[in-house]
Image (cartoon, grey):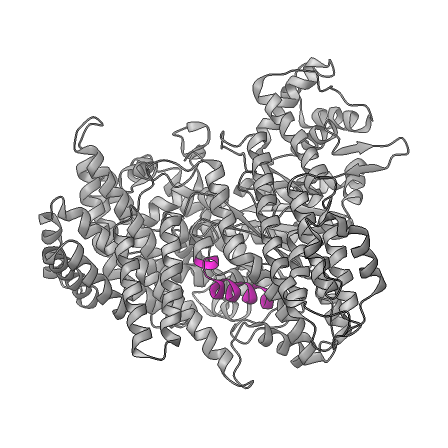
Amino acid sequence: MEYLEQLLDSVLLEQVGEVLVEKVKKIRVLSQTIRESNDPAAYKQIKAEIDLVEPPLRQNVIRAFSVYLHLVNIAEQNYRSRRRREYQAQDTTLIQPGSLEAGVNKLLENNVTPEMVTTLLETLSLELVITAHPTEATRRTILQMHQRIAGLLKSWDHAYTRHEKKVIDETIANEITILWQTAEIREKKPSVMKEVSNGLYYFDKVLFDVLPKIHQDLEDILYEKYQQRFQVPSFLRFGSWIGGDRDGNPNVKATTTWETLKTHRELVLKKYKESLTNLRQLLSHSAKQVNVSDELLTSIENEKKLLHSDALFKVDEPYRTKVSIMLRKLELTNEDSDKGYFTAEELLADLYMIQDSIANHHPGQNPIKLLRKVIRQVELFGFHLASLDIRNHSGEHESALTEVLHSVNIEPDYANLSEQDKIEVLLKVLNDPRPMISIYDTFTEDTQELMNTFRMIKKAHDTFGERAIEVYLISMTRSVSDILEVLVLAKETGLYRVYADGTIKSKLHVAPLLETIEDLKNGPDMIEKLFEIPLYRRHLTARKDLQEIMLGYSDSSKDGGALTANWELYKAQQKIHDIASGYGVKLKYFHGRGGSLGRGGGPLYTSLLSQPPVTLGDGVKITEQGEVLSSRYLLPDIAYRSLEQATTTMITAIMGITQEEESATKIQPSTEAEAAMSEVSNYALEKYQSLIFKDPGFLTYFNQATPLHELGDLNIGSRPMSRKGSSRFEDLRAIPWVFAWTQSRQLLPAWFAAGTGLQKFVDQHGGDWKLFQDMYETWPFFQSTINNLQMALTKADLATAKEYTKMVKDESIQKRIFGQITEEYHLTKDIVLKITGQSELLDHKPAIKESVRLRNPFVDPLNLFQVELISELRKLSENDENADELLTEVLLTINGIAAGLRNTG
């Protein structure tokens, strides 16, 4: 890191001058002194220094700290990549924890037989879904610079000569210079299609190659350890919401989703052309040297007329000729010609044909890996690249059906019916094979748009394959009718149909989203009522008896606090799983986690470990969003590491095996532990809601003691900050809720009320902490909960937070609420240390602890700048000539703090 710091200082000196460098160094040293000695005099001095910095120097000082934090992120990722390579350089006695090899070794150590491995592989399923949720404050242009600098650092590690190192030094300095000269702030909100482009960047540059490698390496390691070749299915996939999520985003239309699907297809066909071109170079086998299958030779003879010229047809090199034909057919596919491939399965068939022919003359124990890779790519990505989920709010469906049912004279006022009456109306419609409406019927704009969305899904299935859109998600699902309404809309567009003999064709998973604490508590009863309906069970039969259910971590946490939300999520999963088992239904849980700790964030593998073990066997989906995408998937080495840890966790957890690096034993919690968590949760919920919902000054405090309103000008997403443009707390989205608390270093959603909940339980049960200490050692869910508290408490900083409270105009509100926050913080910290037996927070993760320690002195000054600037900005009218410059500086501090704290939203 010192290396990059020196390069940055030299760039700042050359670009701006000595005044900037000296000012930055002075503030940096003071900030470090405060962190090391907590010296009040140094604190007064740093505030005075910051107060004295005026434009234009002030903006450059802020940017300097921000750029430094970006370089810290790059250095840390390079360290992780280097550490992985160091493990790989060792002999087989030293294997990196969490690696695929470590996971397979665990299977052997626990006497998992080849037959059990086969069953395990059939069970294994993990889908990661990228979303456009606006938490990534860094522009893609700057992320690409990160990628280039990271690549240069990796090259520097491998450079042998002084000249090579000198050239790399100069190139990195150039990149930092360009970084300094690039605007950090987006001038306008990104369009939905720009968000689509940003998401596809990770597929193009990283995932298209890394995903096949994970599968190939697992296959090879299993072969090496078990001495037999297993067929590893395509268990690890990526999906997307970008361009399909219309909940609260008026910019996502049916036409937008269609354009998204076309963009997906264009990219995947381009990637296949690149892969096949490389494969053609490799497969130079001569028909004079090897025996090529008759099937392949016949296919060439039948299709060689597709080639542009005879020059590409070489009788002596049949594999190259076949691949040339395949490349031409991909071009025709892109042109929608009937001479191209209609489906990805046809492309796969050609690749399997080549593989089968090569098997006749190539050693089976050492298959051609590039060919295997291309086959895996087609198996994973099809002609759709990533399955696109569609999401909409339950109220939109009710509103549309109210209009439709009235217009066709079935029900005059559907929206005001009782729940039971709604169900009866919907089942009557669903059991009738005839559609209610025709394509010629017209409705209000919103209803017409909703119908167009379902028609677009049908068209997407016909054009791109059913994997292009498999799931329709319903936000704010509260009742059985919310789910049946979607089936009715699907029926009207040919996605669902009942035949005369009672059988059902259903081409879409309908997935409820349980978001609030109340939804999670009522969810099991709702699901049981749904499964009791014979027609819905037949729908599930048509969907291979699989029900997908999404769980919302964001709104539940905002509604009831992180501890209560996580416990209600855990309980709901267990209860619904038990219900589904009774009906012979498989469940796939879709975890709507955010990047921040207040929205279910944390490492991917710990997210998996914290689930009830019984829920992992039918497949898992998890959202990946915002800054999580760049932190995990910007660099191939980091992406591979994250995905192999997740794979290993799934493999071992499904088999009930503990990983070495986890201290917890993979067991179901005791009845006593579950009862304790329920009681703790009740106490915590009462404490949380007494502040958030019952203190009349709380919203005033939140609005004034955080940069909530300034966040809206950051232009980090196409979606509005609140539903319906409302200023009500209930309509505020969880992302700005968490983002604002994180920026102010209070991080309240991630930890508040947990301490009270735990303390009250102990007070009521004899004052002994042993039960919680045992739970921490033996129960992954509780361990994950406590460790997330550690991380949140470490990143929070009350001294900095207190500066933000000075922006609260009512002193009584400021003192009362911040007093509660301070008291609860110290209580929670003391309790976490008692339960873990640690001297300090994050003692169990020294690398993360050190990372936070190194970052704090560079984040703290940005917080102090932010408070000063927001205070000044809020005094000005919108038309004041200084307002724009002040707002820009505020946004720069937001960017810098987000870079420093990483999991911000």
Residue 642 included in the magenta stretch of the image: yes
Overall secondary structure of the magenta stretch? Answer: helix
x then y, percent, for residue 232? 70, 66
- The residue closer to the viewer here, 310 or 724, is 310
Residue 527 included in the magenta stretch of the image: no
Residue at the spot 36% in from the left edge and 47% down from the top edge: 137
x then y, percent, for residue 89? 49, 81
Q: Locate residue 55 relative to residue 827 in the image: left or right.
A: left
- Dividing the picture into quadrants, the one containing residue 82 is bottom left
Span shown in magenta: 631-649
- Point out the residue furthest to the right here: 501
Vertical relation: 136 (above or below) 163: above
Residue at the spot 45% in from the left edge and 51% down from the top edge: 562
- Dividing the picture into quadrants, the one containing residue 791 is bottom left
Residue at the spot 68% in from the left edge and 65% down from the top edge: 372
Could you tell me if residue 881 is visible in this image? yes
